[in-house]
Amino acid sequence: MIAAMVHAIARRWESMLALVLLFGFVLFSLSSPYFLSVDTLSDATFNFTERALVALPLALLIIAGEIDISVAGIIALASVAMGLAAEQGADSATLAVTGLGTGLLAGCVNGALVTLGRVPSIVATIGTMTLFRGAAYAVLGDRVLKNYPASFAEFGQGYLFGPVSIELALFVVCALVAALFLHGTRWGRVVFAIGANPVATRFAGIPVGRYRFALFALTGLASGMAAVLLTSRLGSTRPSIAQGWELEIISIVILGGVSVWGGKGSILGVVLAALVFGLVTFGLGLMNIPGIVMSIFTGTLLILVVAMPAVLQRK
Amino acid sequence: MMSQYRDWSPVARRDLNFALLTLALLAAVVFRYPTFAAPGNLAGVLDDTAILIMLALGQMLVILVRGVDLSVAANLALCGMLAALFNRSFPDAGILPVLVLTLLAGGLLGALNGVLVWKLRLPPIVVTLGTMSVYRGVIYLLSHGSWVNDNEMSRDFLAFTRARFLGLSTLAWLALACAALFIVALRRMPAARNLYAAGGNPEAAACSGIDAGRMQFLAFTVCGAIAGLCGYLWVARFAVAYTDIALGFELQVIAACLIGGVAIAGGAGSALGVVLGCLFLGIVRSSLPLVGISAFWQMFINGVVILSAVLLSARPQGSRRATLESPR
């Protein structure tokens, strides 16, 4: 009985991630005396919060059988929009709204291409990724925008209370909302249903297109939010901002156990994967291992994660 | 003539239309800026597009069998670094060992993708996302993060891509040879027809004795070998090797395939279309400075071209999730 329960828990992907997390935690606290302090750990959260915020809605999108490769392009576009608004003397609140609005709009473009234009989402978002980042380059060229008001730094650098940054608090709230939405509401069940079988879901009278559109818009909005936080944290905008993040964010989602075939996944897994990602980035940084070497680790981990069930099923 | 046109396959018609469009673009640029038509300039355009053409043809094979290879640029960079390091250690070895080395190394890296997709039935997008990171990381380990500059490259190593024959560089000739080979082979070779069959309908292909997984393995291996060779060509052309060369180039390569009419759902596309797609992008890129548009607009224009191409060729229903599904 107990063995069966242990077996059931051990079979869950989330338990594996938690184990990796625990192992990494112990390893890093043993190998660096600076690791286990509240300030250090609080600092470390900045390594993943922005990416993780985008990973949440992207997980929903991938569970629904779609994908969005343009998220980093949206971040760049939204950041440029904010930078231009800041040059016109906009205040911090207006800047945040500009960033969120640009993200939402870009997400709607993706949604429209996929639902109205009937373009496969991977193709559509490769196109818009090029378009959005291209627009950022076209507008900025080799310029840098950094005329942000002093109070704008609060979003990405401020703390809510004690060691809890505004970014971290935002992520926790968004993760709870996403988990409630996906695992606790009828709409969440529909997202799973669309991913498992879109045609059957459509025949069940569910407006599949509208759900897809909404999920793309939501992912755009979250990218806009990440743009606000990242721009605020860096205090400047270059067209190359968040370069390559799309693949890191997708890696977090897949590492979290979300099936690329759609229909499977959990928010808990994505959150744990984001923590693993942040922990490994930060821990290896403490041990003076360059980020590019860490990419060998994440790449291998990613393949192992998807290979594991396949290998286990074969025997 | 018209009835013949109507009898053509949709792919052939698309290729003809696209060829006319590319010619129209060329004509428009030449009409406004006659110097663009100078043989030297056109050869330059081909030179600039050569690596893209080769990579896109390799990528096309993978997309045909319902895959996608995101690791081509990392593969290219890794093999480029291998070539540069080999040349630094054995400057007098000549060019042949470098070519063999990069083809083999690239093929091996591609085969690794292929084995994971074939034997473990993993989704290609995830496998190549992973190997992309791994290959980039390995470059850093090999080079310790340092650059190999042109003063560390032998004369032969650098001269090979620049050698001219009948006004065209080796690079351009290689691209043309590759294009001709693909155009003929994809129509005539049984193995190549099997690629189309495996991508178009894996179950039906399996019934006629074609192993779709094996076809995917072959496609990834060839794509990798081409990427490896392009690694040397890239490093020799730009006379420098470092960890980040061709960063993000994989998406340009995939975009060129899409513009060229390769269906992301697999099973459809022509080598001629892909070559035309690359040439189209190449002409746009080299005419920008003439028209007085900053090079920073290049990416934006690429985006507009990709979206127009896919919107025009969007298929009505079904096969939407096909890229994420590997045939079983």
Image (tube, rainbow, N blue to C red):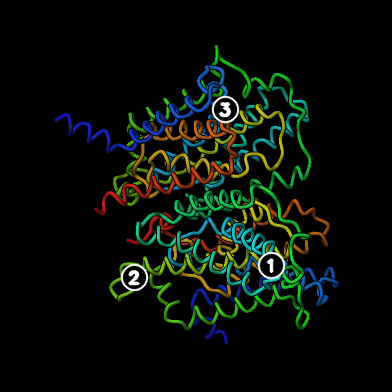
What element does badge 3 sit on?
helix
Pointer 1 and pointer 3 on the same chain: no
Give the left or right position of residue A217, taking residue B82 as reference. left
Vertical comparison of B325 with B273: above or below: above
Local secondary structure at mark 1: helix
Q: Amino acid at mark 3?
A: Phe
Asked where in the image residue A51 lies, by quadrant, the reply is top right
Which residue is disc 2 drawn over?
B211
| Residue at x-position 65% and y-position 27% | A233
The answer to whether residue B7 is above or below residue A97 is below
Say which amino acid is labelled 2: Asp
Residue A190 x/y as whole percent: 34, 39
Q: Do the residues at pointers 2 and 3 share their chain? A: no
Question: In this view, which residue lies farthest toward the left?
Answer: A1
Chain under label 2?
B
Q: Pointer 3 indicates a residue of which chain? A: A
Q: How far is mark 2 from mark 3, CA to CA?
A: 47 Å
Q: Which badge, 2 or 1, comes first in the chain's sequence?
A: 1
Q: Which mark is residue A46?
A: 3
Q: Residues within 10 Å of mark 1 (few under 14, many from 20)?
A: many
Q: Nearer the viewer, residue B199 or B110?
A: B110
Query: Distance of mark 1 from mark 3, alpha carbons?
Result: 41 Å
Front residue of this view, candidates B235 and B39 = B235
Q: Residue B204, which numbered label?
A: none
Return the residue at label 1.
B49
Q: Tell me the element at label 2.
A: loop
Q: How many marks?
A: 3
Q: Position of residue A252 (x, y in %)?
A: 47, 39
